[in-house]
């Protein structure tokens, strides 16, 4: 390479490295996703400040009232403020989904790393478990698990994690199978580094991108699962507000008070949209060159 | 200075395949003295790389060491358990790979990669490891080390990457550096720089080198001693001077004659007839006999171990006199 060509090549590469910091605001999907989620998260965090009523406070004198200045989205059949319940519902649903996905991600990634790197018995066992879980449809398995374990928040976590880790194991295992044959892994071993260090510092950063992107879509799936559970009466127990339960309860009054079912549904759609945009944007930004 | 740093005796590495046993290394013997450089030459598939992997204990899972010994610093490393072998890696025996682009972690800053061994193997603190990395980078001739330490491998040119690889290999202060075709992937001008760097490091740090290459010119420039490999075995050893001037194995002779000769010592460029043997079905007798111009009946059966000759050399050929005669008749090296 000539000196000039080398300087040019280096300049473009440095440009690329600083890529994430410099390019994120030029990736519209990323910006849109972060903005939508940021607003929702902000609303959930600042719930007491932007709502006017206690979400579980009943007011039996003002049930099923239409939108008004004191109740912007009206009240439900027990006189609870719909707007407050949607905002507090975001707290419940987002918290459960994020925590459940975080642990699925953590457990699935660790099992995937070990199974891909060591192969042998560890891999056989892990792959068998993955296949067993994958053999059942996602929602049905979660619903069945919650039904068997009993419906409370802790069991929702358990069910989602028991079903969710397999996706991360599949993604990470596949990536590790490819990456571990790369020479830099051999070089790390030739340098006498321990397996733990090779897995953590050399393999993980090279394989984790796909899993991070999938986690965004997975949060959407998990929110839908939680909402579905709530709709079926197996979710977060009343009176804690949850979008699924709200959609279900509002259904009875669909012809007179359509807001009660529709707005929780819109909340789900907007959240899902934000996460999907974020996933797309991340995929663009993190894609290795 | 009497005891060599590394002594490999009759090393055998085999791969189990569906169609039989592949003898990738089949009775290889060589020695590396302290502070010396040994060149390991041979064509693709002659077992050079597998032999190197065996030295550091990083053979693929399908491979098995079927015999022989590897003595490093007086210890037979093949008898050590995995933890003790791992302790040797990097600290005593380090490796420089052929392709610096793929042998560096693409998502780790090069400064961190160089400082990793000082950090986790030598127990340095983070700041100390960073200082050590910068020091190593200057040692291997990377200009502007402070800025380059924060670069990722893809931001560096091929030559700089190979310098980074060498810095990593040196980072835990090894006694022996195994270089697996360290210059093959580089431009000719850069090749020369890297070669000179390795030689100066050998002199400055007193580190021993094993230099695997199929490039005879590189070996001639870099090494004092040479071991020629063919079909998994070492067929000739000696000083580069003696072996290249008067080869005593027809394979060595063939290799030397197949190098284009710009000095015009030889009239024509020749090649070795035939192809390297299938390592899963080696011919009986001397593995080179089907391609050998000096073949006699005795070559087709029996064992052909290295035989010591005068002048600290050894050959596996029984017709070494005929070979040397032929080399004298038509010299292979300029200004020999």
Image (tube, coloured by chain):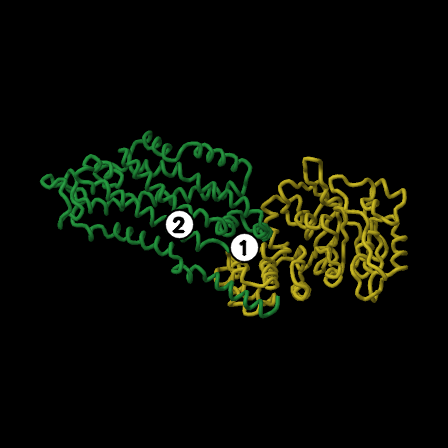
- Separation of marks 1 and 2 at Cα, in angstroms: 26 Å
Residue A19, position as x, y percentages in the image: 45, 61
* Disc 1 packing (10 Å; few <14; some 14–19; many ≥20): many
Of circles 1 and 2, the one toward us is 2
Is B63 left or right of A211, judged from the image as shown? right
Q: Color of chain A here?
A: green
**Which quarter of the image is occupied by the N terminus of chain A?**
bottom right
Which residue is painted at 86% across and 56% down in the image? B310
Quadrant position of residue A30: bottom left
Which residue is painted at 28% across and 51% down in the image? A40
Residue B172, position as x, y percentages in the image: 58, 58
Q: Which mark is residue B105?
A: 1
B59 and A284: which is toward the camera: A284
Is B286 left or right of A141, judged from the image as shown? right
In the image, is residue A14 above or below residue A268? below
Q: Secondary structure at mark 2?
A: helix
Q: Chain of mark 1?
A: B
| Residue A107 in view (yes/no) | yes
Question: Which chain's colour is yellow?
Answer: B
Q: Which residue is mark 2?
A: A279
Is B273 left or right of B132, judged from the image as shown? right
């Amino acid at each position: 390479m000539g000196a000039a060509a080398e300087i040019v090549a280096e300049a473009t590469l440095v440009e690329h490295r600083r890529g994430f910091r410099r390019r994120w605001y030029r990736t519209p999907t990323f910006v849109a996703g972060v903005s939508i989620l940021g607003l929702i998260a902000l609303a959930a965090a600042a719930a007491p400040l932007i709502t006017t009523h206690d979400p579980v406070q009943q007011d039996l004198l003002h049930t099923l009232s239409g939108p008004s200045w004191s109740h912007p989205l009206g009240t439900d059949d027990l006189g609870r403020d719909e707007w407050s319940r949607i905002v507090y519902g975001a707290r419940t649903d987002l918290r459960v989904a994020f925590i459940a996905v975080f642990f699925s991600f953590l457990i699935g990634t660790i099992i995937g790393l070990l199974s891909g790197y060591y192969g042998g018995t560890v891999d056989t066992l892990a792959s068998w478990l993955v296949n067993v879980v994958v053999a059942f449809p996602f929602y049905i398995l979660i619903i069945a698990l919650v039904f068997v374990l009993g419906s409370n928040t802790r069991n929702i976590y358990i069910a989602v994690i028991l079903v969710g880790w397999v996706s991360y194991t599949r993604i990470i295992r596949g990536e590790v199978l490819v990456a571990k044959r790369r020479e830099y892994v051999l070089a790390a071993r030739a340098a006498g580094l321990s397996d733990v260090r090779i897995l953590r510092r050399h393999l993980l950063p090279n394989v984790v991108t796909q899993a991070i992107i999938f986690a965004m879509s997975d949060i959407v799936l998990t929110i839908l699962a939680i909402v579905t559970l709530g709709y079926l009466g197996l979710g977060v127990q009343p009176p804690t507000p949850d979008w699924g339960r709200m959609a279900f309860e509002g259904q009875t009054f669909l012809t007179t008070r359509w807001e009660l079912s529709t707005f929780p549904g819109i909340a789900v759609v907007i959240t899902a949209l934000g996460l999907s945009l974020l996933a797309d944007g991340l995929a663009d930004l993190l894609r290795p060159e | 200075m009497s005891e060599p740093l590394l002594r490999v005796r009759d090393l055998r590495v085999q791969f189990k395949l569906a169609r039989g046993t592949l003898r990738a290394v089949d009775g290889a013997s060589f020695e590396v003295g302290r502070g010396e450089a040994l060149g390991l030459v041979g064509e693709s598939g002659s077992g050079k790389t597998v032999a190197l992997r065996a030295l550091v204990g990083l053979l693929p899972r399908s491979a098995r060491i079927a015999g022989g010994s590897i003595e490093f610093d007086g210890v037979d490393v093949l008898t050590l358990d995995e933890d003790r072998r791992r302790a040797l890696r990097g600290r005593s025996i380090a490796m420089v790979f052929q392709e610096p682009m793929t042998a560096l972690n693409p998502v780790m800053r090069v400064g961190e990669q160089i400082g990793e061994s000082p950090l986790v193997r030598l127990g340095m603190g983070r700041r100390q490891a960073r200082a050590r990395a910068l020091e190593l980078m200057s040692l291997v001739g990377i200009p502007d080390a402070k800025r380059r330490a924060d670069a990722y491998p893809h931001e560096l040119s091929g030559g700089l990457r190979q310098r980074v690889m060498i810095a990593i290999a040196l980072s835990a202060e090894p006694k022996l550096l195994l270089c697996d075709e360290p210059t093959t992937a580089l431009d000719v001008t850069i090749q020369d720089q890297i070669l000179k760097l390795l030689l100066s490091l050998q002199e400055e740090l007193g580190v021993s080198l094993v230099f695997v290459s199929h490039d005879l010119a590189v070996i001639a420039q870099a090494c004092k001693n040479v071991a020629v490999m063919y079909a998994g075995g070492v067929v000739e050893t000696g000083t580069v001077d003696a072996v290249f001037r008067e080869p005593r194995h027809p394979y060595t002779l063939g290799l030397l004659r197949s190098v284009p000769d710009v000095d015009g010592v030889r009239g024509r460029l020749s090649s070795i007839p035939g192809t390297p043997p299938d390592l899963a079905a080696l011919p009986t007798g001397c593995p080179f006999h089907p391609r050998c111009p000096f073949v006699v009946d005795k070559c087709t059966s029996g064992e052909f171990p290295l035989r010591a000759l005068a002048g600290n050399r050894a050959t596996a050929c029984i017709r070494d006199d005929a070979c040397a005669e032929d080399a004298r008749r038509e010299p292979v090296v300029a200004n020999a």
